[in-house]
Amino acid sequence: MLIEIWTRDGYSGNEEAGLIDRLSRAGLEVGAAKLSRLYNIDAAWPRGHFKRLLSGLLADPITEKGSLSGRPGLDGFYRVEVWLKRSATDVVGESVREAVHDVLGLAPRGVRFGRAYYLAAPGRRKPAGGAAADPYQARLRAVVARTLANEIVQTVTIA
Amino acid sequence: MEELFSRFTSLNEKELVRLDKAFGWSLSAAELVQARDYFRKAGREPFRGELESLAQTWSEHCKHKTFSGPVRFRSGRKVKKYRNLFKETIVRATRELDRSWCLSVFKDNAGIVEFGSDGKWGLAFKAETHNHPCAVEPYGGAETGVGGVIRDILGVGLGAKPVLNTDNFCFGRLDSKKKLPKNALGAERIFRGVVDGVRDYGNRMGIPTAAGGIYFDDGYLLNPLVYVGCAGLIPAEKIEKKVRPGDLIVSIGGRTGRDGIHGATFSSANIDEETSSSAVQIGHAINEKKVLDVIMRARDRGLYGALTDCGAGGFSSAIGELGSETGARVRLENARLKDTGIEPWEIWVSESQERMILAVSPGKMPALEDILNSENCEYCVLGEFTGDKRLLVTFNSETVVDLPMDFLHGGVPSVEKAAVHRPPRISRRPPASRAPHGRALRELLSHPNICSRHSVITQYDHEVQGGTVIKPLQGRYGDGPGDAAVIWPHAATGSVRDHAGFAVAHGFNPAAGRLDPYLMALYSVDEAVRNLVCVGAEISRTALLDNFCAASPAAPEVMGSLVLAAEGCYDAAMGYGAPFISGKDSFYNQSRDAYGKDHPIPLSLLISAVAPVADVRRAITMDLKRAGNPLYLAGVSRKGMGGSVYNEVHDTRNNYLCPLDIKAAVGTYGALLRAIKAGCVLAAHDVSQGGLAVTLAEMSFSGGFGAVVDLSSAPSEKGVSALELLFGESPSRIVVEVSREKETEFRRLTGGLPVARIGSVQERPELEAGLGGRGLLKEDILVLKSDWKRELL
């Protein structure tokens, strides 16, 4: 189950502005940016268990929101997902795994932690047709590899 | 290659080198021949684990072959031979100084000096580098660098409690336009990742990160340097460790995986999913915190006789080192593993993080297990130390290593290295002024090597443990650049009635090293010592760490610079009466750029200095305190703009480095210290990068006061220009604010020394400098501060 957590509007300005500024310094102009934290919890449990983890463990109810079915309202944004490779130690994932056990009394098979970046090109919508038909996405991939991910230890997908 | 390995004892030198390259051992041809001849004599082929053990134990990282090997140094017609460069320079100074307060030097994971007045405590101090891992994966590299040096402190004696982390970084310029090779990371990326890694590990461990520095130069674009240090407190009666035959070999902390096996060879390999887990280590601070808590409890109950950390070489070096006098029997099937697909020899040399090895008497194992279980800290018993002086490692019925300890530790052949010195052209022409002084000051304040580091420093928890008395950011607004950190380690000693503390400072000057490596060493030690003076530390009991980073020692010019710098360390240590207590070196810091050109780093020597502060309540900061107080300059301003930041911004065509008069510096510092102790001095700040004008500006805007100075009264060499007075970086100078009520006493204490009143603190927020009635600059301190307070990150 993938649980996605993000900072509520009104609290997220600094992290979004910082990301836009960082990508700009690396040579990519970005119109808007949103950030999410991703927790992939490997367990065959009822949905209610995951809802409890979302609200009781992973998200701060005042400053954050979360979802079990993806983040809504981001049509036209590129979604960049960054995960540690399976072969790399995931310290956050390991800590969350222990915390999940403390909350539910059940241990998942594993927990992996990742990040999602939603980026909108300035002044235009994402074209249909994928990377081949979209030079902006190709540039985005190159800049992400230089700024947001290290492909020695992480995997990157852009959609 | 397996076929070649199977007939190792019959291989010729060429084949041995081919095998070495394929297996990533990094052994030299002479070392391979030595190993081959040993196994020939033994009448058998080696096991893979044996060659891996030799490669680890004989590596530059573990054996320091370059520094502790023979060198033939030539400078012009002069030739000097060293049998052991390290022992004949750095160690020699310590031996000749023979300070009674040095409790353990050059023999354990860190140096230890006496702490406090009752003889109950020792202060352990160590600095390490983690350069190559940070170039490949900055976050993980920095994390594991911090984790490693903390384990050095945990593993010194019977374990010290860490009370301070330090960090010093060298990166390429963030605005560099140089084209990078395909897989190289940019300077900003490395910078950001390294800072994040140091922050996350130090903060999670609950250790303050409160001293350090950042240096930008394109010489580090492909090879960043990441120096990480740690200081800790240890009870004096817990300094000696001893392994006894029969002691159990107990591994505690993290599990063993395929992390860091031959990590150094991966930088030039294709990057894919298979290589990643071996190439990069990711730190796990929470696991290390558990290890720390176990060690502190078990140490105080006397539950083990010796311990050390698993660093480079993993079990191989840790168990090999602890068992070097006894021998060891290791059963690798007992190791707790992260992966099941790992080969036995990989378990043996894996550099998985957060592991420590303890030598535990069997009778004490149940009590130790109770503590381990209560702290939720994983452990395993790998075997026992024997009395046969052999290293026998097995995995079930398979032999992995069966070697005598004396060959493992004493078999490495020493090869003489050639060293040569060719001094660069030095110009002593009068320096040309290239910009109005006020504008130049503003440019210098915004220079990356001078501007504020607040965006990095504020990410670190420098308050945890509640003992950081003099903080890295100081002054009225809590953002002035401090010279040294002062720590009151009551969290370790448990005593809030005793106000004894210690100060830590650094000296670093690769720009001077490009011109004269010998003087660089002197300048760096002087800078570290005068930074200690600035907070009121007892410099007569300064102890030093040396951390050299250089390019390939196969280049005679690199070795020549190293020899000169090592000689400089000897002379500086003797001159300041400050012994070296520990150190480390890192070589092969050079890479090829996108055009195939080699880029060696400049010779880089970090001097870390520690000295006691008898009463932390009397330590002082660098910000101006009160309008009307007199300002004094201590130390002589000399000719020469060599190595200065001004020269980098506006080339003056003068690159002369002035000599350093250590005797005069020691006299001046001693007098200043007496004045600080007498309460005459309210603020002190050293003159370093950017020169006197930058020092005055920083003191002014940090205190929220202006200053007016006339430099005609400054102690100075005859003929020194206004430019050199303002922006020259001649060493051994400190600006002090003196309490006007105690000025007479200050003058008495500093009488006969090059200490002169140059001006006073003023309410008006302006820095005004003149020279005998001629105005040199007049700048608003708020404007100066806005230039200085850049966001580096």
Image: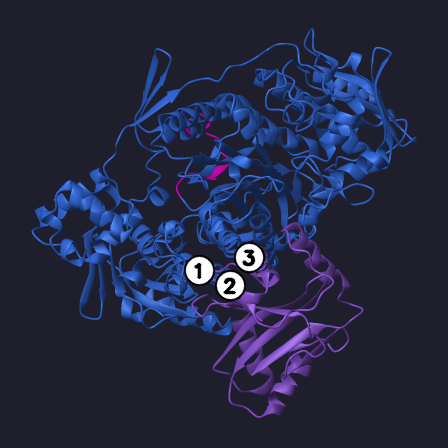
Chain colours: A purple, B blue
Q: Do the residues labelled 1 and 2 touch (CB within 8 Å)?
A: yes
Across and down, in percent, residue A38 comes to 60, 74
| Residue B352 to residue A76: above or below | above
Which residue type carries mark 1? Gln
Residue position marked by numbered label 3 in the rendering: A142
Across and down, in percent, residue B119 comes to 54, 43
Viewer-proximal residue, B520 or B393? B520
Residue in view at x 48 percent, y 44 percent: B129
| Residue B654 to residue A142: above or below | above
| Residue B558: mark | none
Residue position marked by numbered label 1 in the rendering: B353
* Chain letter for the residue marked with disc 1 in the picture: B
Which residue type carries mark 2? His
Residue B750 appearing in the image = no
Across and down, in percent, residue B714 comes to 76, 15
3D distance between C-alphas at marks 2 and 3: 30 Å
Quarter of the rendering containing residue B429:
top right
Specify start and end residues of the magenta stretch as a single range. Answer: B95-107
Viewer-proximal residue, B339 or A158? A158
Across and down, in percent, residue B37 comes to 12, 43
* Chain letter for the residue marked with disc 3 in the picture: A
Per the image, label 1 sits on a secondary structure element best described as loop
3D distance between C-alphas at marks 3 and 1: 32 Å
Q: Do labels 2 and 3 share a chain?
A: no
| CA neighbours of label 3 inside 10 A, class few (<14), some (14 to 19), many (20+) | some
Viewer-proximal residue, B14 or B676? B14
The answer to if B781 sits in the magenta stretch is: no
Per the image, label 2 sits on a secondary structure element best described as loop
Position of B420 compared to B511: left or right? Answer: left
| Residue B284: mark | 2
Residue B329 appearing in the image = yes
* Chain letter for the residue marked with disc 2 in the picture: B
